[in-house]
Image (spheres, grey):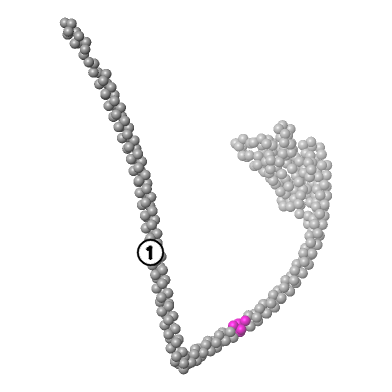
Amino acid sequence: MALARRRSDRRIDYWPGFVDALSTLLLAIMFLLSVFVLAQFLLSREITGKDEVLNRLNSQINELTQLLALEQSNSQDAQDALANLQASLSATEAEKSRLEQLLAQGAGAGAAADERIGSLSGELDSERQISQRALSQVELLNQQIAALRKQIGALEQALEASETKDRESNAKIADLGKRLNVALAQRVQELNRYRSDFFGRLREILSDRENIRIVGDRFVFQSEVLFPVGSEVINDAGRVEMKKLADAIIELQKEIPPEINWVLRVDGHTDDRPLSGTGRYRDNWELSSARATSVVKFLIENGVPANRLVAAGFGEFQPLDTTDSEEARSRNRRIELKLTER
């Protein structure tokens, strides 16, 4: 029993050695794998570099091929040029030989020279004929230029005479313009005088009405004096006032000279209130025009010549008072009379 226990105590433990050996083997394998991977990397780089070098070599080969083709083409051109030079040299040598033969012959060469001289004489005669024709054409052109100069001189004289007449005409026109301006100023003064007389008479005739007044060069009737609200029909009181106006115009017409082309302009105005559109007139334009026309027709019916009257409608767009009040609207609703030239 004691011997067996001692033997069992003497057993050898191999496991640590086995682990060490296995670790060493794994390290060796990893080292070999690292070396293999590094070798693969270096080999791939080397192959890639070789591919790039190969591509560059192929590119250089293509360039050299193109240069070789260009050199071959240039060489062919040079050969063609050399052949042409050789042909020209051969022709020159042949001509030289022919001249030498002519010199050797002597008499034959003299005859050829005479023939050449005769040909040159004929050419010279032809050139002389051409020169003579050219001289004739130059002479004809000189004659035409002289005739044109005469015509230009005549035109300049006519132009100078025309300019003189224009200056005289302009002076006469300026004088006539001054006379016309003077005459117009006189007519305007006369018309202003008659306008003053006309307004003075109207002032005397219609002085008892507060709704009738003079504004500048116009005689103003408030619409309420002549028309009902929204209507163009002259009321009874308005007809009385318009009859006075017609009589005054007829009396004035007798005094104004017939050469003064005067007219009495009747202008219709409304306030800025829009119409409803359901009545007879759609807007203030139509109402103002209708009222001016009614006054003109009434004056014609009472003896005023139609050719001395003008009707115009302005709607609400020429107000006397621009404030927003009933008094302003009342002032703006009006009929204006203006004595003026046509």
Residue 325 image point, x, y percent: 72, 31
Identify the magenta region: 133-138
**Crowd class of label 1 (few under 14; some 14 to 19; many from 20; radius 10 Å):** few
| Numbered-mark total | 1
Task: Compare residues 56 and 195 and report the one nearer the observer.
Answer: 56
Task: Compare residues 251 and 260 and report the one nearer the observer.
Answer: 260
Q: Quadrant of residue 218?
A: top right
* Left or right: 90 in relation to 211: left
Residue 191 image point, x, y percent: 80, 51
What residue is shown at x 43% (from left), y 78% (from top)? 89
Query: Which residue is the extreme one toward the bottom?
Result: 107
Q: Is residue 28 visible?
A: yes
Residue 128 image point, x, y percent: 57, 86
Residue indicated by mark 1: 72
Residue 245 drawn in magenta: no
* Left or right: 25 in relation to 293: left
What residue is shown at x 70% (from left), y 74% (from top)? 155
Relative to 87, is 289 above or below? above
Q: Is residue 305 visible?
A: no
Task: Compare residues 118 and 57 and report the one nearer the observer.
Answer: 57
Instruction: Identify which amino acid the numbered label 1 is placed on.
Output: Gln
Say which quadrant the N terminus sits in: top left
Relative to 99, is 278 above or below? above
What residue is shown at x 80% (from left), y 57% (from top)? 181
* Left or right: 36 in relation to 122: left
Task: Compare residues 50 and 4 and report the one nearer the observer.
Answer: 4
Q: Secondary structure at mark 1?
A: helix
Most common SS among magenta residues: helix
Residue 135 drawn in magenta: yes
* Left or right: 258 in relation to 284: right
Residue 215 image point, x, y percent: 78, 41
